[in-house]
Image (spheres, grey):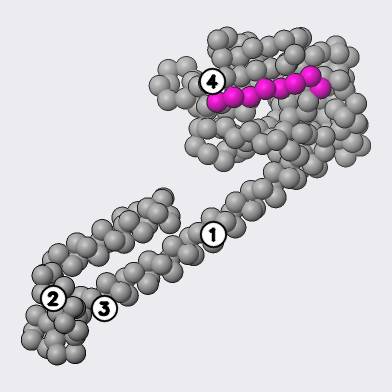
Amino acid sequence: MFRIQVDNLKFKLPNETDPLFVISHLVVNPGEKLAIISPNGTGKTSFLKALISKTESSQIKIHGTIAYVAQSQGFTSESGGEKVKRELNEAFDQHPDILLLDEPTANLDQENQNWLINKITHSRASILVVSHDQFLLTNNFSKVIDFGQKKKSVEIFVGSYSEYEDFLETERNKQETRYKDYVQKKKQLETQVQKRLQQAYRLKKGNGKKLSLSDKKSLGRTDHGAMKKKKARSANSLKKKNWPNAGPTKN
């Protein structure tokens, strides 16, 4: 039996028409530990609060009890670290089925960070942790939820945070290779088109003696404007094939 299941969740802030984030499908099994990452403002904390309140009840299914430790703000007589550790202890002592932690190491020293990692490792709860802390992220987690890789659409990666970083690096290298290949092919195409334009120009000026008969026939049926249009169509077609995000060719 799963602890959390999310399907087709399009989370919207009040008075907003566009979703802040979209989760197509997510399952959290008993005892799983998930890291939630991305820049601020992408919806990580809103997601945790949605799980607690089940505001999107038809898209969010919860099985079990939930404990939540919010990101610590506005300290009293306790220091930040003392307050966070006390709240974390209280949450673990509840022995919840699901534990949600929002930036739990923000005010913890190294000793207490190690204490928290040990608590997470040995807990039987399904734990979702929002964090920017590299030290914490490299421990424990079997899935990574990334709110920041694609616009609005949340990425779910099965594997550790270190494996996810390796995956992203591989994807960046592939993208760079595709772009370099696109630039090279575009340059080759432009060189070929420019050569054809020069041949057409020489033919138009009556200096086509060095052209083959087939070239003369071909170029004789193609005026300068048509050749430029053909160049643009060919170049744009190459862009779409090899680099879909590239803009249109400028002539």
> Which tag, 3 or 2, sits closer to the chain's start?
3
Of discs 1 and 3, which sits in the foreground? 3
Q: Position of residue 185 (x, y in %)?
A: 41, 67
Q: Residue at x 34, y 69 (%)?
A: 189
Q: Residue 44 got which mark?
A: none
Residue 137 visible in this rendered orientation of the protein: yes
> Which tag, 3 or 4, sits closer to the chain's start?
4
Q: Position of residue 172 (x, y in %)?
A: 59, 54
The residue carrying mark 3 is 195
* Residue segment shown in magenta: 24-31
In-image side of 113 versus 160 (left or right): right
Q: Residues within 10 Å of mark 2 (few under 14, many from 20)?
A: few
| Vertical side of 65 occupied by 186: above or below | below
The residue carrying mark 1 is 176
Of discs 2 and 4, which sits in the foreground? 2
The residue carrying mark 2 is 217
Q: In the rendered structure, are the residues bearing label 1 and label 4 in contact, judged by CB atoms less than 8 Å apart? A: no
The residue under label 4 is which amino acid type? Leu
Q: Position of residue 27 (x, y in %)?
A: 67, 22
Q: Residue at x 43, y 21 (%)?
A: 16
